[in-house]
Amino acid sequence: KSSWDVMFEVMIPLQQSSRRAKEREAEYMLMAAEARREDAKARASGELGIAWSMYAQGRETLRLLEHTLLPQAQATRDASQAALSSGKVDFDSVIEAERQLIDIRTQRLKTELDTRLALTEIKKLTGDLK
């Protein structure tokens, strides 16, 4: 008598839902990472825009201070000193002209500092800061 053994294998997808849940979790994690990357990109772009705006504004203010306001204040101070010598103005006028000149010089230094800080921020954001 001869016998035959027959075997067959059936895979029952018992872990199918667990595998699908892991796939969904991986997809959600990828979507969250992409959202964080886009958020960081938008923030960096905004920071760069602000720094560039501050730099450009500082350059324009420096140009105005150095080429217009500072020469005018120096001329006013010089004219006040000359007028004091001839007795046409009092000493308070000369002091006020000198104070205005000092204020403009101080404003120029502050603007130059702010402009350099903005440029440093631009370099930091673009990776050019060494």
Image (cartoon, rainbow, N blue to C red):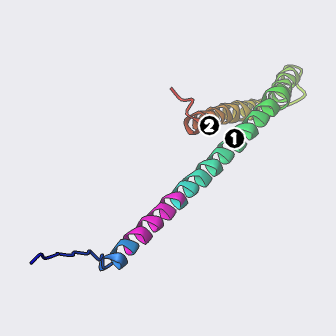
**Front residue (pair 32, 100):** 32
- Determine whether the residue tagged by mark 2 lies in a helix, strand or loop: helix
Counting from the top left corner in percent of width and height, residue 113 is at 62, 33
**Rounded to the nearest whole Å, what is the CA distance between mark 1 and mark 2?**
7 Å
The residue that appears at 69% across and 42% down in the rendered structure is: 54
Counting from the top left corner in percent of width and height, residue 23 is at 41, 68
The quarter of the picture where the N terminus appears is bottom left
Q: Which residue is mark 1?
A: 52
Q: Are marks 1 and 2 in contact (CB under 8 Å)?
A: yes
Asked if residue 27 lies in the magenta stretch, the reply is: yes
Occupied quadrant, residue 15: bottom left
Q: Which residue is mark 2?
A: 122
**Front residue (pair 130, 26):** 26
The residue that appears at 63% across and 38% down in the rendered structure is: 118
Magenta region, residue range: 21-34
At label 1, counting other C-alpha atoms closer than 10 Å, the crowd grade (few under 14, some 14-19, many 20 or more) is some
